[in-house]
Amino acid sequence: MADPSLAQSQTASPTTGVMVILTVKAGVTRDQIMAVMPDEIRQTVQLYLNGTVREWYSRSDGRGAVFLLNVRDVAEGHAIMEGLPLARQELMDHDYIAVGPLMPLGLLMAKP
């Protein structure tokens, strides 16, 4: 019989959201960021109010933010984030990670 942990690791979890890690690009000044922040905040709040942004956090290192988006895939998340002012002015780098249910929990549901 195959190892259940191996089988579980080979099964992809469905995507239920996308985590976006924003990092200020090298050489960008605080003044450049702050000049754009009023528009960035207004548009981000609208995304939160319409349910697109599920959660958002400041990075503890002060270099950006982390968003958890209610989207189907990375492409949808990318399209949304690239429409925001900081991205349009190329002040931030974005890393996108599709997330979903913690699939190993399914092992707890298996009959002994």
Image: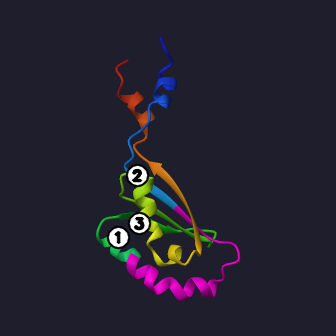
Q: Position of residue 19 (x, y in %)?
A: 47, 57
Label located before the other in sequence (2 or 1): 1
State the SS at label 2. Answer: loop
Q: Is the residue under label 3 in contact with that under label 1 (CB below 8 Å)? A: no
Residue at left offset 50%, top offset 52% = 97
Q: Is the residue under label 3 in contact with that under label 2 (CB below 8 Å)? A: no
What's the image's color scheme? rainbow
Q: Which residues are magenta?
A: 21-43
Label located before the other in sequence (2 or 3): 2
Say which mark, if any, is on residue 73: 2
Residue at left offset 30%, top offset 72% = 49
Q: Mark 3 packing: few (<14 Cα in 10 Å), some, or many (20+)?
A: some
Q: Which residue is mark 1?
A: 48
Q: Position of residue 47 (x, y in %)?
A: 35, 71
The residues tagged by marks 2 and 3 sit, at their Cα atoms, a distance apart of: 11 Å
Q: Which residue is mark 3?
A: 80
Quarter of the image containing the C terminus? top left
Amino acid bearing label 2: Asp
Q: Does residue 26 show up magenta in the picture?
A: yes
Label located before the other in sequence (1 or 3): 1
Q: Is residue 17 above or below residue 84?
A: above
Q: Is residue 29 above or below residue 97?
A: below
Residue at left offset 51%, top offset 56% = 96
- Between marks 2 and 1 in the image, the one whose residue lies nearer the viewer: 2
Q: Position of residue 72 (x, y in %)?
A: 36, 52
Q: Is residue 36 above or below residue 109?
A: below
Q: How many badges with numbers are in the image?
A: 3
Amino acid bearing label 3: Ile
Amino acid bearing label 1: Tyr
Residue at left offset 39%, top offset 31% = 106
